[in-house]
Amino acid sequence: MRLRNKINLYSTVLFIILLILLNGAIYFSFSQMMYNNELERTIAQATRAADGVGQIEGKVPHQEVLRAYMPINGMLQIVNNDGSPGTAVVDPNHQYLHKMDVQYYEKQVQEITSYDRVTHTFASLPIIWRNGEVANLQITVSLQQTDEILSTLRIVQIIVTLLATIPVLLSSRFLSNLITRPITSMIQTMKEIRESGQFRRIAQPKESKDELNQMAETFNEMIDLLEVNYEKQGQFVSNASHELNTPLTVIESYASLLKRRGHEDPELFAESVQAIHSEALRMKGLIEQLLNLARNDKPLRIEMEEVALADVVAEMVRTIEKSYQRKIELEVEGEVTVQTDLQKFKQLFYIFLDNARKYSEETIKVRIMTLQHEVVVEIIDYGIGIPALELEKVFDRFYRVDKARTRKTGGFGLGLSLATDIAEAMGAKISLESVEGLGTTVKIILPPALSH
């Protein structure tokens, strides 16, 4: 059964049960009150009759004495102490009361009885009858009119219950629709998301602040979070594959050289093995960085050492030149030694050099110099550049400049975010200057070695 029908059925049944219980309580209380009032009236009539009978002289006939106190719709009679009926007077319309069994009681009795499906009040009082014997003065009154009133009340209550069911059905239907509308909308939205693959939201009434609106708001927030995570996941996979492409390309290039000329040229063999080993280590570190970036919970592991920067950069420049057949000019101002993590610096340098390679066709310049007790590594390209409005955002995680233009090359997404994390971990600074259409200059600023 659908939730809407359950709400409609349960609320209607519950309301009808409560209405029946309420009507039953009202009917029971009202009927008991009426019956008790009639019984008290009957007892009062019996008491007055007993007092009156005791004061009348014996010359008055017994039947005339009783007729003076005969109740309307009832019977007044004397019952002897042997249980036999004595003098009795009865309303002409209730002659059937003569047929009722009689009984002698030792003490006062009052009760509500039923005879021939009609309710009666009954009272019996002990009296001293004219012959000096103890007898019972018994009075029986028919409550047929009271029964008719209560019967009318029952009919009215039944009709009211049936009539009340109509607005209950309508209100429960409205309530069930009100409750299930956001749920139905949520189900329909989820079906549309499943069929179309596009994230959708539930429309929310601005004036409502109830739990249903909160549920819709929570659902929309969840969809927002899922959409963001879904986009991040797609961009992460795209950018991760892009960042791993460079070391794999270098390894493939040197492996091809080894396959063609490795046996004939020992120097080439040694260079290729060194390059493959270096790129394998860098790729291992890059994978670790990617995992840390995905989990966003573990700090980068840094191993600081003194590094002869010119030799390291020259080796990396030569590797990129041979792997991608690109011209790279290297300028070094003197011998430069820095305190840094070698593998992390290589990753950092490759990220910017690879971006320069992808976004420019002209010669790339790499310059190493010392400025004010800091070592600066500049990577200069003369390519497409970065728009001024986007320059401050390119280091944000998963941000891409001009997605349509960079879809083939991979964008400025994960790589620059990794560069920020690496630079911060190893105590380096990054400066980025770019003019759209003219090129980009990246500066990696490193602290010098402790001995310098």
Image (tube, rainbow, N blue to C red):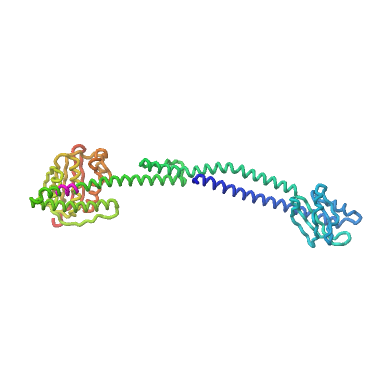
Q: Give the left or right position of residue 158, taking residue 309 as reference.
A: right
Q: Residue 188, image x and y in percent?
A: 42, 42
Residue 418 at x, y percent in the picture: 24, 49
Q: Residue furthest right?
A: 59
Q: Is residue 22 magenta?
A: no
Q: Quadrant of residue 103?
A: bottom right
Q: Residue at x 79, y 58 (%)?
A: 124
Observer able to see residue 251: yes
- Compare residues 310 and 415 and report the one nearer the observer: 415
Q: Could you tell me if residue 46 is visible in this image?
A: no
Viewer-proximal residue, 443 or 104? 104
Between 79 and 214, the one lying in front of the other is 79
Taking the view exactly as shown, the residue that stands out farthest to the top is 437
Percent across and percent down for residue 16 are 59, 47
Q: Is residue 61 left or right of residue 113?
A: right
Q: How many marks?
A: 0
Q: Which image quarter is the C terminus in? A: bottom left
Residue drawn at x 15%, y 56% is 306
Magenta span has 252? yes
Q: Quadrant of residue 300?
A: bottom left
Above or below, comparing residue 62 to residue 360 in the picture: below
Q: Which residue is found at the position 60% from the left and 43% from the top?
A: 164
Magenta segment: 248-254
Spot occupied by residue 275 in the image (x, y as percentages of width and height): 14, 51
Magenta residues, dominant SS class: helix
95 lies left or right of 331 = right
